Every structure is written in C-alpha cells, then in structure tokens.
Image (cartoon, rainbow, N blue to C red):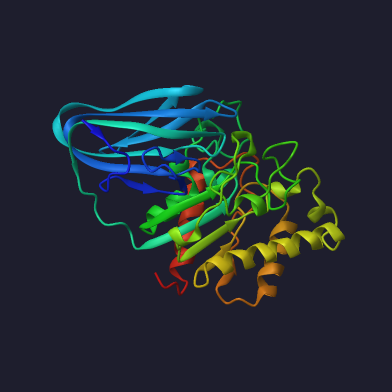
Amino acid sequence: MKIELDNRDLRYTGRIDDRNPKKPEFIFAATSLEFRFLGTRAVLTVTNRRQYWNSYIGVIVDGVQQCMQLNESGETVLELVNGPLAEHTVMVFKRMDSCHEFVLEELELDGELLQMPQRPGRRIEVYGDSVSAGEVVEALDYIGKEDPEHEGQYSNSWYSYSWQTARRLKAELHDTAQGGIALLDGTGWFCEPDYVGMESAWDKVHYNPEFGEITEWDFSRYCPQLVIVAIGQNDSHPYDYMKEDQGGEKAAKWKKHYGDFLGRIRGVYPQAHIICITTLLEHDRAWDDAIEEVCQRTGDKKISHYVFRRNGNATPGHLRIPEAQEMAEELESYINGLDIEW
C-alpha cells in the first residue's frame, strides 16, 4: 500500500523543504521522518543529490540503528522492514550535513499506519559546524586523535552532542549545522574557495549553492525555547586573526558581526534563551574570550556563554562519541540550572 508522504501520521522534524509536501526534501543533519505501523514490510524510495563524500542515511527500526548508503545520484530503494507481522517504530534520519540532499519519493507499507505519540514540548535549535552535525563521530579508533581518511562513513548526527543533549532533555531538535562553516562569508571551509558563512546560511532551507536555488526558512514554523550558537572554530581559516591580533580591526569586525548575529536570532526568537559555545575541538582561547566579550556587551540576560571543562583542548580531530557525550552531559547540567520557560 502506498502511503502519501504528507500523511498526518508521518512525523517530520527539522528544516525540510516541503513546498511539494508529497516529496519532502531533507537538507540538514538530524532531519527525520518517523512513523509507527502494524505490518510486515516498509520500503522507502529516495532520490539523492551528492556534492562530496559518499552519502549515508540513518535508519532506526524498533530501537536498532543501521546505516544505509545511497546511490550517488538518482533513486535508491531502501527496505526498512521485512519480517513477521508486528508493530514497528521507524525513524529515517539524515546522518550528514549538506554534502548531500535527498528527496523522499515514495513510502510503501504492507500494513497499517498507527498514530504517533505527541511531540515533545521542549524545542532546541543549534547553529553550528561539523561538530554540531556529528561529523566523523563514529571513528572510535581515533579518540583524541586527528581524523582518519574517510568518505563520510563515520559521520552520524545521532551521536552529535546536539542530538545527545536534546534527547537527554527530552526535546525536539533542529540541527542547523554545516561542516566547515564559519560566521562570516569568505572564511571557514564550507564551499571553498567561495566560502559561505553562517550569516548567509542561518535563515535558509537550501543554502548550498552547489545544489541550485537558495530558499528562505519561515521562522514561524518552529519556535525553540533554547538556541545554542556553536560558531567560532572554523573562523580561524584561512587566517587566525583572533589569535594573532585580538585587538585588531579584523577581530573587531568579527565581534561586531557575532553580536549582530545574536541580535538576528533574538529578533526571530524574542523569548528564547541563547547559549554561546565552542567545543572540545582544539582552537585558540582567544575565540572564546571574544565570545565572552560580545555576550557581556549585549546586556541580554537570556544570552549566556558556556565554556566546557576541556574546551578547545580535548582533540585535534573531530569529536568521537564519548567526547560528544561529555559535551552533552555538561550542557544538560548547565541548561538544567537555567531559568528556561519550557
């Protein structure tokens, strides 16, 4: 039986391009489709668009997670469930950032859709880079080390500190994170050599120019009570001006733009608490000092700066699962101490 992809018993989470609701497009890490059904078989067909690395998606069926590789382009048919008659809970989610995008084309069930439980009342949004997206997090043989050579197989947003924190808090998550991104256009690593910064991507659905049209996000569709801003690690490329000249012109420009960015977030989420962080990934402390300065300057009592116990000192490569868990545990404790109106 074919299930229309705008069926009300399907649950979508994340910034999704659903201009055609019968063919929703997944762009951001941790974007998901969830459903429950009583039956024997579930098959999902998707169309992939790839920029770099191999393309992998996550599937969790009845609590068991697996990784599935998509064809570089065109359709991939994914058999999600095939077994005896039973009640099943299924989640299909985007493991990776906009190194690829995919369109849900068709869902077929041998069975009957069941109603999903109520959504969580708590909502979180994260603006971040590769660490927030869970890039290379599954490379467990490289804890505290440089990254291994890979083709994307180790990236998994499920184990990012972002999603781990949200699950600990029993909150819904929009993970607006992209590997290599910095705050300003012209810096960082994303879309080298014509670098795209978070200033240009934060309010978009499609934001990767390699995939064509750039589209705007409607902020009225999701209103988080908590926003985490995890930007300031890729900003040192191609030149670490904050480390070399923290009082200089470039540093002053970055601080102004960071403050303006916080102001834009406040503009769309007037009541949200905003936490500014960097991560355990190695970087110069001057960036954290700059963030602290900007946060103090805002005078906004609902903007705070959190520095992790091993902030900037834990690993020269991306965080692995235990390190992301360490961040999530610290964040959970810190957030629980805040006066957030969930």
Would residue 312 be visible to someone looking at this image?
no
Q: Nearer the viewer, residue 80 or 219?
A: 219
* Residue located 50% across and 47% down the image: 324
Quadrant for the N terminus, please: top left
Q: Position of residue 122 (x, y in %)?
A: 38, 62
Foreground residue among 56 and 276:
56
Residue at 54%, 39% (x, y): give it: 97
Residue 99 occupies quadrant? top right
Q: Residue at x 50, y 60 (%)?
A: 219
Quadrant holding the C terminus: bottom left
In the rendered view, would you say 202 is above or below 81?
below
Q: Where residue 220 sits: x, y (%)? A: 46, 62
Say if residue 299 shows up in the picture.
Answer: yes
- Compared to residue 324, the image places residue 49 above or below, namely above
Taking the image as shown, residue 116 lies to the left or right of residue 73, namely: left
Please report the residue visible at 64 percent of the width from the left and 77 percent of the height from the top. Answer: 299
Between residue 172 and residue 8, name the one nearer to us: 8
